[in-house]
Image: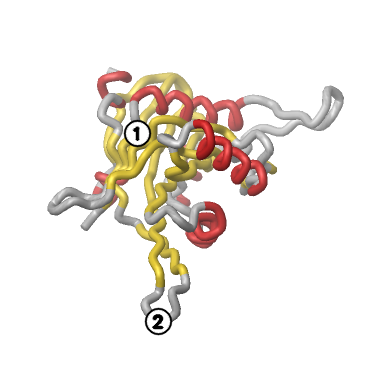
């Protein structure tokens, strides 16, 4: 059975603006240092999980997003600081126990639309597919299901608007695409799932491409 990721409306601008900030604006280590643009960025999804019940699929509800400002960012990759993540997770568990770590998000920046289309840039990279199960096992081994979101961004040659739409074909239920002024953005969802081996009780975490993405207010917000 498929699984659902539901992102509440107020979380969406956090995701978009995080990707836009890393992509469009210069970043310096200090005032006179070299500046960089078109960077990837990384963050965490927080909320709660609902296990599968009868005919209803397992659901993850994202109610908040935080950015990992300590992550090492590059134009082709991003490396989060695991100590930062475990610190935030412990902080939430102690003071906001009703909110748990339910997933991650990171951006894929591209120079232009042709590059995105040629590389299917809205999809997970091979590195993403290896990293997500490792992250799940290291950071949230007690969490049966985590969501992972790719936010792809590129510049357009002309300014314009296009209503948010679903991805095409078999990816229709797994993501959205939209244009806003002179940029285009994609959202694409994936999941990792953990279970114990029946033989030796070892934790096994797998990568899955069956997470349906639901953002109920997205189209209404941009229309």
Horizontal and vertical percent position of residue 38 = 62, 35
Neighbor class of circle 2 (other Cα within 10 Å; few <14, some 14-19, many 20+) is: few
- Can you say which quadrant of the picture contains the N terminus? bottom left
Residue situated furthest bottom in the rendering: 199
Figure check: 207 above or below 162: below
Say left or right for 14 vs 58.
Answer: right
Q: Is residue 46 visible?
A: yes
Q: Residue at x 44, y 64 (%)?
A: 205
Q: Residue at x 39, y 31 (%)?
A: 63
Neighbor class of circle 1 (other Cα within 10 Å; few <14, some 14-19, many 20+) is: many
Q: Quadrant of residue 5?
A: top left
Q: Which mark is residue 199?
A: 2
Q: Is residue 127 visible?
A: no
Name the residue carrying label 1. Answer: 7
SS for tag 2? Answer: loop
SS for tag 1? Answer: strand
Q: Residue at x 50, y 53 (%)?
A: 140
Horizontal and vertical percent position of residue 156 = 47, 29
Going from N to C along the chain, the mark reached first, 1 or 2, is: 1
Horizontal and vertical percent position of residue 41 = 59, 38
Say left or right for 92 vs 34.
Answer: left
């Amino acid at each position: 059975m498929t699984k659902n990721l539901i992102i509440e409306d107020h979380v969406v601008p956090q995701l978009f603006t995080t990707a836009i900030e890393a992509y469009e604006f210069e970043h310096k280590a200090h005032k006179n240092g070299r500046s960089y643009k078109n960077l990837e960025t990384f963050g965490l999804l927080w909320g709660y999980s609902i296990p599968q019940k009868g005919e209803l699929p397992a659901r993850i509800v994202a109610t908040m997003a935080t950015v990992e400002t300590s992550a090492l960012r590059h134009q082709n990759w991003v490396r989060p600081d695991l100590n930062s993540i475990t610190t935030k997770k412990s902080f939430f568990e102690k003071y906001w126990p009703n909110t748990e770590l339910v997933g991650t998000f990171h951006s894929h920046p591209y120079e232009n639309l042709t590059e995105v289309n040629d590389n299917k840039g809205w999809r997970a990279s091979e590195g993403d597919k290896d990293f997500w199960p490792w992250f799940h096992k290291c950071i949230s081994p007690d969490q049966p299901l985590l969501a992972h979101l790719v936010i792809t961004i590129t510049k357009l040659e002309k300014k314009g608007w296009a209503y948010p739409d679903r991805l095409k074909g078999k990816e229709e239920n797994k993501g959205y695409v939209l244009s806003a002024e002179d940029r285009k953005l994609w959202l694409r969802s994936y999941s990792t799932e953990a279970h114990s081996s029946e033989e030796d009780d070892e934790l096994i975490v797998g990568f899955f491409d069956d997470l349906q993405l639901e953002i109920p207010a997205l189209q209404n917000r941009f229309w």
